[in-house]
Amino acid sequence: MRAAVDWLLSRQDAAGWWTDELETNVTMTAEHVLLLCFLGLSLEPVREGIIHHFMENQREDGSWGLYHQAPADLSTTIEAYVALKVLGVDAGSDPMCQALRVIRQQGGVAHARVFTKIWLALFGEYPWEGVPSMPPELVHLPASIPFNLYDFACWARGTIAPLLIVLSRRPVRALGVDCGEIVAPGTEHLLARVPGSGPFWWADKLQKLYESLPRQPGRAASRRELVEWIVERQEADGSWGGIQPPWVYSLIALNLEGMSTDHPVMRRGLAGLDGFAWEDQGGWRLQACMSPVWDTAWAVLALRAAGLPPDYEPMQRAVRWLLSEQIDRGGDWEIKAPGVECGGWAFEFANDIYPDIDDTALVVIALLLGGEAGSTCTSIERAVRWLRAMRSRNGAWGAFDKDNTRQIVYSLPFADFGALLDPPSEDVTAHVLEMLGRLGFGPDDPMVAGGIAYLRQTQRGDGSWFGRWGVNHIYGTWCAMTGLAQIPRAGEATRDMMERGASWLLTRQNRDGGWGETCYSYEDTSFAGVGESTPSQTAWALLALEAGGLGGHPACDVGLTYLRSTQHDGTWTEYPFTGTGFPRDFYLNYHMYRHLFPLLALGRLGSRRG
């Protein structure tokens, strides 16, 4: 524990925050290549670093996947293959031939996801007729009408708004290479077909018919309003939402509407992308997002668990930085929660338009345990008022929005990507319950009672909980049990849930003493809690058992031994992805997780052992 504390303290920024790489699959970097190509910008500064990164992550069969040791993913492999070809890698080389073989074996580009088809259509490598259409006029719909922009989760909303421009413009620019080989023989007839149209196939047909007309009344005005909507939401760091998808499509859409790369908005956006780049011996890659607020709050909790007092200077610096990051401006969340002062925190350095409930609850807990009461009281009160206003009708909390549950959006042909909504989830709700419990709110508080009822309703038959933002049932069970354990006077009301959760965790311990679960459990729930042991997931299981009153159980002794035996140079190594972006579609490897959670577990459970 002392070695882990020293490692963490040595990596604190002078301003007080911590963060590390947020690793994803190669899609982010492949799309960055295509973005620079579309905008006519030079690839030379990053060419060799990106090639090295791709080759480092290509698997033996020639494919690329969504996470460590994942099955081959068709769309990821197509985007990597095309990007490498643009970067000048010989299509006849063994790595490229192997990748093409996988692409054709899986049906070629005709079976890729919609976003991959859009990227290729931008360069004439896929017909726009085979891409779903969406009218820019959606920007005019009020929040009460289905399919308005606020029906979508904030990340989807920020992506769809610029795509409404892109899909209506249907641009084609030079790629510089021909990629016709990614069409598998015999699938040519599928290219112009829009799959997954469901009950709205006729809407796509009508939209394409309207787009073919020589004159489209009102369309220019809709695009102008979309441009205003997009520009208003650019963050201080040049990003949109602090995440890659809305960022790159916003740059493309604004460029199509006449903004050159020298325009101030475009310059800020492109410069901001450079700040999300990561380069080391593994090559050059683009992070999908960054997590300094989240990482710093967990660091405060881990150091407190390890015995560092609140008046210790690194702790004070971290708390001061967190306080400086509290948001006092409005955002899209006001559509569903008007008239409320914001008191939230965001995930990143500068995505103030989109504070999130999970970060806010966690920061409040960090301030309660690691801050001086007098200096944090006002900030905590503001945060609690905002969080209470953001509760959804079912008594639970989502990540960014309130009551973002209109399932009809999944009927769109566009919706082959599985995270268009931000409904309440078990893990976020549990973090809010933990915060409320630490503030003294008991089961007699209506919001606490509603949260408990939601967790009871969502507990699975085997005793575990689903994890929306971490992999997966180990994460969800840890969050739920930790949240329930902090609610005062709730022992009898929650005892059975805690016992069932602990029993499930005990059955999932691996022979080496650790716990692990792969992202595949989102595909097949029979894999819940199954996977090679990882430091972060082992720590989550130990912390959950400690919350359930089993911190002294022999299983915890063995789990602590696993953490002790796998530590090296004061930290841990973790290759599997244990963070979740979008279940089944996009996963994350938070490089701080491998350190923060083992330290937190060693601190909380180690204190029992002197």
Image (cartoon, rainbow, N blue to C red):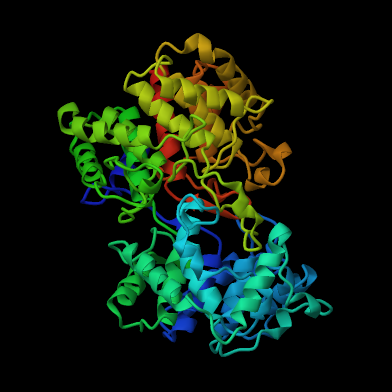
Query: Is residue 454 left or right of 272 when viewed as pictured?
Result: right
Would residue 331 be found to the left or right of residue 521 on screen? left
The quadrant in which residue 600 appears is top left
- x and y percent of residue 437 in the render? 38, 21
Q: Where in the figure is residue 227, as x and y percent of width and height?
A: 38, 71
Q: Position of residue 293 (x, y in %)?
A: 33, 46
Residue at (24% x, 46% y) in the render: 328
Query: In this image, 24 relative to 316: left or right?
Result: right
Q: Going 39% across and 48% down the picture, which residue do you hit?
A: 335
Question: Going by the picture, which residue comes out furthest to the right?
Answer: 186
Return the residue nearer the eye: 515 or 468: 468
Looking at the rendered image, the quarter that the C terminus falls into is: top left
Residue at x-position 34% and y-position 22%: 438
Quadrant of image for the N terminus:
top left
**Residue ranking furthest to the front:** 217
Along the line of sight, which residue is nearer the eye, 552 or 469?
469
- Can you see residue 462? yes
For the point 48% across and 82% down, the residue is 38
